[in-house]
Image (cartoon, helix red, strand yellow):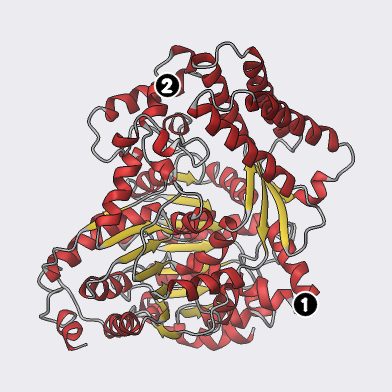
Amino acid sequence: MSELKTIFSENGALSSVISGYQPRQAQLNLAQAFANAIDKKELLIAEAGTGTGKTFAYLIPALLSERKVIISTGTKNLQEQLYHRDLPVVKRALVSKAKTALLKGRSNYLCILRHKQQQSPHMLADKSVEQDLKQIARWAVATQSGDIGEVTSIPEDSRAIPLVTSTIDNCLGKECPDYSDCYLVKARKNAAEADLVVINHHLYFADMAVKDTGFGEIVPDSEVVVFDEAHQIPDIACEYFGQRLSTRQLVELGKDIETEYRTELKDMRQLGKAAEKLQTSAKHFRLAFAIDPEKGNWREKGQSPGFDKHLDDLKQAIEFCYEVIKLAVGRTKNADHLFDRLVIARGTLDKLMQWQKSDVSLWYETTPRHVSLNLTPLSIADKFSNLRTEKRQSWLMTSATLAVDEKFDHFTELLGLKTYESMLLESPFDYQNQSMLCIPRYFPEPHDRNVLAELKKTAMALIKASQGRCFFLFTSYRMMNLLAKSLKSSIDNPIFVQGEVPKRKLLEMYLAESNPVLLATGSFWEGVDVRGDALKCVIIDKLPFAAPDDPLTQARIENCRRYGQDPFNKIQIPQAVITLKQGAGRLIRDVNDKGILVICDPRLVSRGYGETFLQSLPNMKRTRDLEQACAFLADSPSNKTQDITKTESATE
C-alpha cells in the first residue's frame, strides 16, 4: 500500500510522466482497494465519479500484481483509447516491461481466405463495395495486425467489411488453408503470451457463450479481471446467453454455399439452386416486416394471422438446403463446415419458435436490409454468479454510473452477486461552481402536443447563450429528427445529426466548428469525451425510460409482476437513472470545464420518483429559470444568486 501511495503522490512516478499531475485521494483509495481485492481474490464494485482517474487507479495495481490480467471495456473505441493512450503512460511511469496485447472479436480482423475469394469479378456487388474492396486490398499488402479498423478511408459500416472478415459461422478454424498466417490466430497467440490483455465486454461474453466449441472467441485465462464501464454488463451478458438468428447470417450462408458450388462442387446443380433459394427466402422474409427499422415482440409477430406463410417459406428454404448439402458431406472440408452451419441455423430457428417457453423474451429487430430473431433470458443471475464462483479470480467492476440512490442493489441483483466489497467515490470536480442544472419551469409533460415547439424554443435560447457548442440528447430518433428539421430552417449554426455519418466522423466534424450543435441519441449518451469550450451545454429532452413497447423491457416487466414485484420501481426507474447519469456525464469532463445541463422534463419535480433521479446526479447548482441558466453561461453577475434556487427546484 505504501508503494501505491508513493506512486500517486505529488512527486511520485505518475508526476514524472504527466505534466501538471495533481494527486487525487479518491484515485488512491480505489487503487488501494483494488490491490487488496487482488491479494484476497475478491470482487470489488466501485462507482468512480467522472474525473476520479479510475483507469490509472486500476492499471497500476494490475501491473504491479505481476499476475495475468484481462481488462474489459465497454466499447472498441474505449478499448483502443486505453491500450494506445493510457497504458503506455502507466508503463512509462512504472518502468514496466510487462507484455501487453489488444484483442478484438474475429469480425475486426482481415480473413485472408475470404479476401482472396473477393478477387473473383462475379463477387463484386456494386461500385461502392468494389471501391472499398480496392482500398482494403491496398492496405492488406502492408498491414501487420490485420485489424480492419486501420482502413480509415472506408466507412465503419462499409458493406465490403463483412466480405473480407469471418464470423464464427463461416470460419474454418484449423482446417483453413491460411490458418498459419491468420491474423486472428496471431492476435490470440499474442494475447495468450501477454501479461495484460485489453478486450471488450462483447468479446468477453462471446467467449463465455462459445467456450465449448473449440475455435470460438478465445479469451485467455487470467487471475485478475477488470470490467470498466461495468454498467453495460447485464444487457450484454443477457444477449450472449441467449439465441439469435438473422437473415444476414442466412444470406451469407447462401453466398458461401454458392461459392462452394461454383468452385468445388460444380456437378451439384441442385446445390446452386438451394443456395439461391436460401438467399431469396431470407430477403423476402425481411419484407414481411415494416419498412422502417423497429424492435418488436417476436412471440406475437411469429403467431400473427397470415405470418405463418412467411415463416414456412423460410423453413422450407433452410430444409431444402439442408437436404441437398447433406449429400456433399465428406466431399470437401468446406462442405462439411457449411453443413454444420446449416444444422445450427435450423436448430436455432426451432428454439426461436418455442412460443410457450417462459422466463425468456422472444423479440425481433429490423434494419433497412435485415431482420434478426432473438431469444434473451430475462435473468442471468444464476449463470453469472456461477461464472464468478467457478473462475475464482480477482474482479473489479467499475463505472461512473453503477449506483442508484447511492446503492448497488439494482446492479448486483441483476448479476446474482452476493459476496463483494463496494465503494462510492465522488468526482473531484467542483460541480457547484463549474455547472448548473436547469429544469425549465412551465415545461409541458412529455406527451403534450406542444413539446416539440417548447423544445425548439428552449434549444434556440440555449444555443444562442452557449454560442452553439451544444449537445442535444434524445430518447427517440423520431423527436431528434423532427427537431433537427425544425432547427435547420431557423438557425445558422452548423447542425450535426446522428446517423448522417459514422459516430467518429460526426464528432470530428463537430469539433472542427466554432459554434456547432449536435443532435444525437443512443450511443452518444456515453463514451463521448469532449472537453473545454467545445461543449458548454447538454440538453436532454426527457427522462430516459426504456420505450414501453421495447419487447425485452415488456418481458422483464411481465416477469417482475409474475413474482409480485413492482416493475416501475425495480426495473424502469433504476435503468433510467443510470442512463440519465451517463448523459449528464457528458458535460463536465475536466477541472476547467464550465456548462449547464438542461433536462426538459417536469416530472423531475412533479413526481415523487423525481427525487431519486436528482439525488443520483452530481451536486450542481439548480434553477427552474432558463434565463438564469443562460446568464450562468455568459458569466453574468446574476449567477451569484444561484444558491437560492436549489431549494426552490426541489419544492416546486
The residue singled out by tag 1 in the image is 563
Q: Position of residue 603 (x, y in %)?
A: 67, 74
Q: Amino acid at mark 1?
A: Tyr
Q: Nearer the viewer, residue 607 or 182?
A: 182
Q: Residue at x 51, y 62 (%)?
A: 539
Q: Secondary structure at mark 1?
A: loop
Q: Residue at x 46, y 51 (%)?
A: 518
User: Any mark on residue 118, and which?
Assistant: 2
Q: Amino acid at mark 2?
A: Gln
Quadrant of residue 254 in the image?
top right
Q: Position of residue 444 (x, y in %)?
A: 69, 66
Q: Nearer the viewer, residue 521 or 156?
A: 156
Position of residue 192 in the picture relative to residue 273 (left or right): left
Name the quadrant of the N terminus.
Answer: bottom left
Q: Residue at x 75, y 34 (%)?
A: 315
Figure disc tally: 2
Of pointers 1 and 2, the one earlier in the residue sequence: 2
Name the quadrant of the C terminus.
Answer: bottom right
Q: Residues within 10 Å of mark 2 (few under 14, many from 20)?
A: some
Q: Secondary structure at mark 2?
A: loop
